[in-house]
Amino acid sequence: EDIGFPFAAQAALVTRQHVGRKDETVGLITDLPPETLDAGQWLKANRLAWGIENGTHQRLDVSLNEDRCRVRNTNGLWILGIIRRLVISLFMHWRKRHSKPNHQSLTDFQAAMGEDNLAKAMAFVTHQHPKL
């Protein structure tokens, strides 16, 4: 309760070391007791969470240029964020159906959708009664 997390059961400091970079110390907090989540399990869960973050961030920033977006309207940002995440979901579904190595990136997905499919997609989004 003293640190502002009344339900915290464990807290820890982790120092991350990267070659060629300054060490980074971060705090971790969980409501799980040590019997449920020991130190080794906690570190493993933390690493797995970063794998998800890195995959999503890479797709949003590198492929969809999210960090370079200049939209400042709050509603516009929400809508663009939802659309970008929808694109990632559609890409993941599309990638499962294409086992060819040359169809593995979000850029490949965007190219495959091309202008012909863009017109179909816009018609689907703007139609009053869309059909799949």
Image: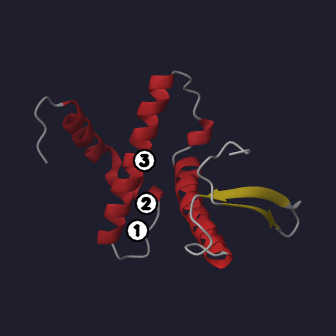
Indicate the amino acid at tag 1: His
Instruction: Tell me which label, 1 or 3, sits earlier in the chain.
Output: 3
The quadrant holding residue 42 is bottom right
Task: Judge depth for marks 3 and 2 and give the one in front.
Answer: 3
Tag of residue 85:
3
Q: From the viewer's side, name the closer residue of 15 and 5.
A: 5
Crowding at dot 1, Cα within 10 Å, few <14 / some 14-19 / many 20+, comes out as some
SS of the residue under disc 2: helix
Q: Which residue is mark 1?
A: 103
Tag of residue 15:
none
Report the colour scheme. Answer: secondary structure
Indicate the amino acid at tag 3: Arg
11 left or right, relative to 25: left
Q: Are marks 1 and 2 in contact (CB under 8 Å)?
A: yes
Q: From the viewer's side, name the closer residue of 131 and 102.
A: 131
44 left or right, relative to 20: left
Q: CA distance from mark 1 to mark 3?
A: 19 Å
Task: Judge depth for marks 1 and 3 and give the one in front.
Answer: 3
Q: From the viewer's side, name the closer residue of 18 and 63.
A: 18
Q: Which residue is mark 2?
A: 108
Q: Residue at x 61, y 76 (%)?
A: 41
88 left or right, relative to 53: left
Q: Position of residue 103 (x, y in %)?
A: 40, 68
120 left or right, relative to 17: left
Q: Position of residue 110 (x, y in %)?
A: 40, 52
Q: CA distance from mark 3 to mark 2?
A: 17 Å
The quadrant holding residue 37 is bottom right
Crowding at dot 2, Cα within 10 Å, few <14 / some 14-19 / many 20+, comes out as some
